[in-house]
Image (spheres, rainbow, N blue to C red):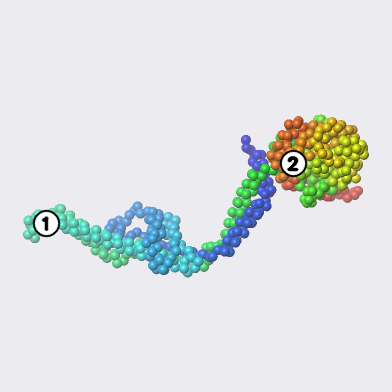
Amino acid sequence: MFGPGNDERHLRDYLRIIRRRKWTLILSTLLVVLASIAVTFVQSPVYQARATVLLEPGSKSLLLDSTSDPAYDASVSAQTEIQVLRGQEVAALARKRLGSASGITASQVGDTRVIALAAKSPDARRAAAIANAYVDAYAEYRRKKAVDDFLAAAQEGQARITQLQRQLDALDAQTPLARAGAQVSNPQRDALAGQITALRQRADQLQLASGYVSGGVRVVTPASAPTEPISPRPVRNVVSGLGVGLVLGLGLAFLLEYLDDTVKSKDELERVAAMPTLGLIPTVEAWKDPKQAVVISRAQPASAAAEAYRTLRTSVQFIGLDRPLRVVQVTSSSAAEGKTTTLVNLGVALARAGQRVILVCCDLRRPRLSQFFNLPNTIGFTSVLLGDVPLADALQSLPGEQRLMLLASGPPPPNPSELLSSRRTTELLEKLKTNCDIVLVDSPPVLPVTDAAVLSGRVDATLLVATAGVTTRREVGRAVELLRQVEAPLVGTVLNGVSHDDAYGYAYNYVYYRAEGPGTRRQPAVQT
């Protein structure tokens, strides 16, 4: 069911997509606007002249019918005459006047009998000349048509008079008195004579009106040379380009979002992994090189990222209330997703909370844990397994961290998976537990090799790390599937690289204070 909460969440998701794809939106809009500006400058100016004419009832209908037609439909008449205006006959007459003429557009003005003609040309005076030429050509065509109608009406009337006269002559021939020249009263003869008289009167009217026929067209407004071109219009083109660019950018942004299979939010990660997200680690803007080993919890303890790691520490500790978590594995679905960074900062956060922590590098193929503390990797986990070095000699203390120790990976073995699945690995992890409160194990990613799956059977909890915008949903789903097949103790996920806006949405918008000295007011040190 949909409700206010769901609608708000959907709107927030849309806004988050727009914010995430803002550069796509900006670039698309900018490109379309620049294209509209370029088109505006390369276009030649086009001028449009406009003239209007009024349609009037034809003279023939008024003369042959003494009453005006009450059913005269202005819209039908105007639409019919617009088609005549666009016809070949009027165009031929216009070309005859100008030598050559481009086409025109015609439209009815509202529900009136007024027709507006518009002509376009690169020359303003030429546009006016074309419009006026079409008006004159149309008026001439209508006058010629009216004269033809008068002639046709006159011929029709004369034919009718001739026919009636024959009937009258035939009737007179049948009457003896009429043949003798006497006036004879006959209703039939009188009716015929009356019709002949009426037709002759109308013929006289037609002959008189034919000299004054106008064709039923009156020019309301003649065309004049325009002062401004109708195109290009820079302001209109830029505004249109801005609107089209925004629509195109939004469509492209949502299309890219639909095609993007990466995990981008906490909700997506929880939906794919089917387990809670224990930590949201925001992006560290000052950390430009992802290959650089930086412990943000030590370098910037008052930053939002350091606080996020402390939140992750709290989540892990709460899980430990229900069951003991002495050995915690940190892994990821693929490489370069921040699993080692997460493990190091989590270890620092736990150590500074009063727990004794040992960091163990079990990524025997691409060890990186020792680089975070600038310590050697020559002696470590493999050295102890092979019996070359005692555990006490392999553990390294970390400068500035009294409760934190490191067990590096040691020399790379030829068979990491077999070594990690051996009984001596289990014994070593058990021995490490006796020297600290919690052991954090850095293992290889799940998908490329089986090392993480092998180690998961020797730990109390497994954390799966993903990076927003990098890790795909398919990778997370497959990694979780592989770990569950070996009954790995998955307890939750960690999402790295969360944007500050998204991170703030999960309550990382907090102000940290530092004391300047006794009796001084607490001031904000970092506001994130």
Closer-to-camera residue (24/358) = 358
* Amino acid type, residue under disc 1 in the picture: Asp
Name which residue lies at 85% across and 39% down. Answer: 360
Q: Is residue 212 left or right of residue 439?
A: left
Residue 174, given in percent of the width and then of the height, sits at: 9, 54
Q: Which amino acid, by three-letter code, is at mark 2?
A: Ser
The percent coordinates of residue 116 (x first, y second) are 44, 60
Q: CB under 8 Å between callouts 1 and 2?
A: no
Query: Relative to 427, is 196 on the left or the right?
Result: left
Residue at 26% over, 59% down: 153
Q: Which residue is mark 2?
A: 334
Whether residue 350 can be seen here: no
Quadrant into which the N terminus falls: top right
Give the Cα separation between the discs numbered 1 and 2: 121 Å
Tell me: 102 left or right of 412. left
Other-residue count near label 1 (Cα within 10 Å), few / some / many at <14 / 14–19 / ≥20: some
Element at label 1 = helix
Q: Which mark is residue 172?
A: 1
